[in-house]
Image (cartoon, rainbow, N blue to C red):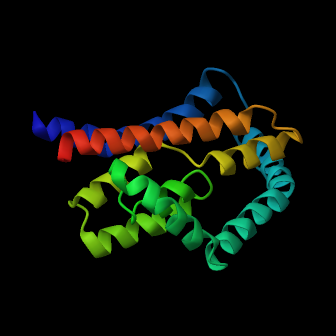
Amino acid sequence: MMQVAQWFAAWSLPLIIAFIPVYAYLIKKVPVYDTFIDGAKDGFSTVLALLPHLVGMLVAVTVFRESGAMELLVNALNPLLQPLGVPPEFLPMALLRSISGSGSMAVMTDIFQTHGPDSFLGRLASTMQGASDTTLYVLTVYFGSVGIRKARYAVKVGLLADLASVIAALFVTHWFFG
């Protein structure tokens, strides 16, 4: 039984990838290659439309981290949050997660190297990484790709959801791992 499960795990994705174009060509009579080329052309125009927004977001994140503003914010929040069970090493990840996936991944990697992945901090960082998304990055990409200039409530709701994910990650990690 285990061999069947391993075979299925190894071959499921390649079979799905092979099945889709075969089904499209044989059953639906879609010109698969031409459709693929048209999609690739559209992809280039999407990249060109998104590039300025992505560069702006990456520059802002880099300036925030390299200027020392991140460290100042962490030092200011630490006395307020440490009595609530928020470790100071976790604050940079909690702050960066909604802005930058690579920035929060770098913080998580640093936590793993310093404290270990099975430490409380490692588990908290892993839970946070899985419980949230890069809200500002996603809004930049989605809104930038369709030309939306006014985010209205999307930013507020997204950041509120990120705060909820930080609280949930702290609660769940404290509950399960003490």
Residue 130 appears in the picture as rendered: yes
Q: Nearer the viewer, residue 68 or 134?
A: 68
User: Which residue is depicted at the point 75% across and 49% down?
Assistant: 140
State which quadrant residue 6 falls in. top left
Q: How many marks?
A: 0
Compared to 64, does 150 lie above or below?
above
What is the residue that sits farthest to the left in this orientation? 1
- On the image, the x and y values in percent for residue 46 come to 82, 49
- Viewer-proximal residue, 120 or 103? 120
Image location of residue 97, percent across then percent down: 54, 54
The residue under the point 85% across, 39% down is 146
Query: Is 63 placed left or right of 146 in the picture?
Result: left
Residue lying at 10% horizontally and 33% vertically, measured from the top left: 1
Identify whether 45 is placed above or below 16: below
Residue 160 figure quarter:
top right
The answer to whether residue 14 of the structure is visible from this angle is no
Q: Position of residue 39 (x, y in %)?
A: 77, 43
Q: Residue at x 77, y 65 (%)?
A: 55
Question: In the picture provided, is 6 more to the left or to the right than 22?
Answer: left
Place of residue 115 in the rendered image (x, y in percent of width and height, measured from the top left): 26, 70
